[in-house]
Image (cartoon, rainbow, N blue to C red):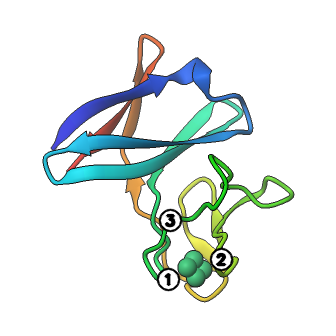
Amino acid sequence: MSWQSVTRADSIAAGAAKEFTIETAQGPLELFIINTNGQFHAYKNRCPHTGVTLNWLPSQFLDIDNRYIQCSTHGALFRIQDGYCVRGPCAGASLTSLPLKIEHGTIWVEIA
Ligand code: FES
């Protein structure tokens, strides 16, 4: 396990999400980070239904009401706070969350 810096916290506006690809010992890791009122959450960008990336437009991860993370392929909805799928073909499954910390304004995620 190791911590890797990803971005400045102030680069992700409140209510917005942003995608990143970082290099790890296992190869590139696609992830995204969501800022909900100053609470940041990081997830691997993989839908538990088929393993595809969740978004089809750059950094577009939320549904039309900005209440859930939505998979663009089959429309599964995931809670922002814990990645749990509440509706869709993978209901009951969860996104893979990544431990996140903020130090001196920089967001770090823990990589297995
Ligand atoms: S690939 Fe995400 S819901 Fe089917």
Q: Position of residue 71 (x, y in %)?
A: 63, 69
Amino acid type at image mark 2: Ala
Image position of 9 with respect to 66: above or below: above
Q: Residues within 10 Å of mark 2 (few under 14, many from 20)?
A: many
Mark 1 vs mark 3, CA separation in Å: 10 Å
Q: Position of residue 46 (x, y in %)?
A: 45, 66
* Circles 1, 2 touching at the beta carbon (< 8 Å): yes
Q: Earlier in the sequence, mark 2 or mark 3?
A: 3
* Residue at image mark 3: 53
* Circles 2, 3 touching at the beta carbon (< 8 Å): no
Tell me which residue sits at (18%, 37%) in the image: 2
Mark 2 vs mark 3, CA separation in Å: 12 Å
Amino acid type at image mark 1: His
* Residue at image mark 2: 76
Tell me which residue sits at (54%, 23%) in the image: 9
Mark 1 vs mark 2, CA separation in Å: 8 Å
Image position of 63 with respect to 47: above or below: above
